[in-house]
Image: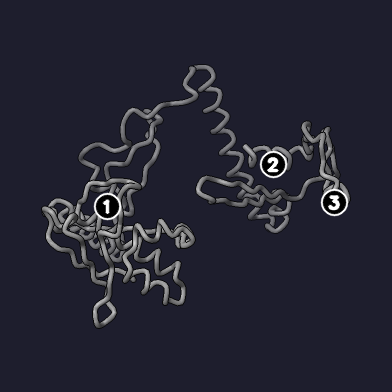
Amino acid sequence: MDVNGCLQVLNSGLVPGNRNADNVDKVMEKFDYIVYPSRSIQPDGIKAFSVTSFGFGQKGAQAIGIHPNYLFATLDKAQYTAYAAKVSARQKKAYRYFHDGLINNNMFRAKDKSPYDEAQRSNVFLDPMARVDTDKKTSLYAYPKHTPKPSAAMTKKTAETRTMVESLAKTQTAGPNTKVGVDVENIEAINMENETFIGRNFTEAEQAYCGKAANPQASFAGRWSAKEAVFKALGVQSKGAGAALREIEIGCDENGAPVVQVSKLLKTGQRSACSRMLC
């Protein structure tokens, strides 16, 4: 919504007012280039905009948009003419689609099946050349029956991808002791200040090792990820936050390679685990 509003500002040059700005901080009022109008204003023109969006998990993004006139000014006449023709064709197609949706009440078409049939599934998943297209008869998305012939390099890549996927599938079904465990964690997510958390999830040996590391928090995060990976590899039923990861200890052998030791509780019905993972 924010980006759409900014695009409208670029198009119209009209900056909507902040109708709720009735209590501006005195500290901010002294800045000449920051205004808080309660009504819309029409400046000489808007050249660009910046939108900052904050998402869940402290993840955010910033989008910067520039008025298309500044982009067009960098193009020569031939490039601009070709681009204008593409835009015109796209707008005409969108116009027809929009009015067809209004007249036939099918503006939003719910997808009731995958755009490929059962026989195409393997090709769609494993062929990097597979591309979805619009069926001219039904106007629905579908994969063509025959895909372009890939190059030799692409064929090799496809074969490698197929082999990797098949090997992973076999690993997941071969048995309880041949599963793959993978885990990734943000270093900042490990709260070293919480002594209860550290004591519950890391053994004394692990705490001593990580405490001597150049970056203790990164070392704790690496061992946390390794423990989670072991849980997944052993197929242990998840206990969520109630799982004490002290039952798994990540150590190092004489060569510095990671070695896993698990408690008797986790060994029940499982073989003792040994793994090669990042410390």
Pointer 2 residue: 6
- Quadrant assignment for the C terminus: bottom left
Q: What is the secondary structure assignment of the residue under circle 3?
A: loop
Res. 126 mark: 1
Q: Taking the image as drawn, is residue 162 in sight?
A: no
Secondary element under disc 2, as helix, strand or loop, is: helix
| Nearer to me, 233 or 109 | 233
In this rendering, the answer to whether 254 lies above or below 206 is below
| Amino acid type indicated by mark 1 | Leu
Horizontal and vertical percent for residue 105?
Answer: 49, 17
Residue flagged by tag 2: what amino acid is it?
Cys
Residue drawn at x 78%, y 38% as measured from the top left: 15
- What coloring was used for the rendering? one colour
Which of disc 3 and disc 2 is earlier in sequence?
2
The picture quadrant where one finds residue 165 is bottom left
Q: Which comes before the other along the chain, label 2 or label 1?
A: 2
169, 150: nearer the viewer: 169
What numbered label is drawn on residue 33? Answer: 3
Observer-nearest of 158 and 54: 54
Residue drawn at x 28%, y 58% as measured from the top left: 229
Q: Nearer the viewer, mark 2 or mark 3?
A: 3
Vertical placement of 175 versus 24: above or below? below
- Expressed as whole percent of the image width and height from the top left, the position of residue 248 reads 26, 61
Residue 171 image position (x, y, % from top left): 16, 56
Q: Answer left or right for 256 relative to 100.
A: left
Q: Residues within 10 Å of mark 2 (few under 14, many from 20)?
A: many
